[in-house]
Image (cartoon, rainbow, N blue to C red):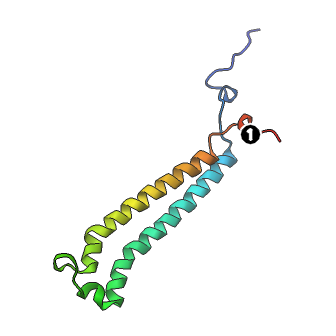
Amino acid sequence: MARLEIGPGDPRWLKEFDGPDEVAAAARTQRRIAVGYGLVFVVGVLAVPALSLTLPWWSQSRLLGGMSPSFVTVAGGLYVFFLVLGISAARLARSVEGRMLGTSDDDEPAL
């Protein structure tokens, strides 16, 4: 009888693989991160009109070249906000995934 060899189709061939529970936990964590950063995004975007409605000086005072603080924020500040928010969300998601997935049982230190 021919002996079957372990190959790419056999999970024992893999040095690292994640179980369904680990993948589900990582997906839940990634979802919480996405919802949290999504809420920060919405609050940041809605802050500009809210400030315009509640603080008269926000749209009436003048800064650089006669532009109001509201215009300066919309013209440049929001882009910086989006860039920082996107980079921080991506870095956090990548680090969480790296910590939660891709480890084998052999990597755990013995007690």
Q: Name the residue carrying label 1.
A: 108
At horizontal 74% and vertical 12% (from top left) the residue drawn is: 3
> Which of the 4 image quadrants contains residue 87?
bottom left
Question: In the orientation shown, which residue stands out farthest toward the front?
Answer: 64
The answer to whether residue 48 is left or right of residue 72 is right
Question: In the orientation shown, which residue stands out farthest toward the right?
Answer: 111
At horizontal 67% and vertical 47% (from top left) the residue drawn is: 22
Q: Nearer the viewer, residue 25 or 107?
A: 107
> Which of the 4 image quadrants contains residue 110?
top right
At horizontal 51% and vertical 60% (from top left) the residue drawn is: 34
Q: Position of residue 74 (x, y in %)?
A: 28, 72
Instruction: Tally the marks.
Output: 1
The answer to whether residue 10 is left or right of residue 79 is right
Q: Position of residue 49 (x, y in %)?
A: 33, 81
The crowd level at tag 1 (other Cα within 10 Å; few <14, some 14-19, many 20+) is few
Q: Position of residue 53 (x, y in %)?
A: 33, 88
At horizontal 21% and vertical 83% (from top left) the residue drawn is: 62
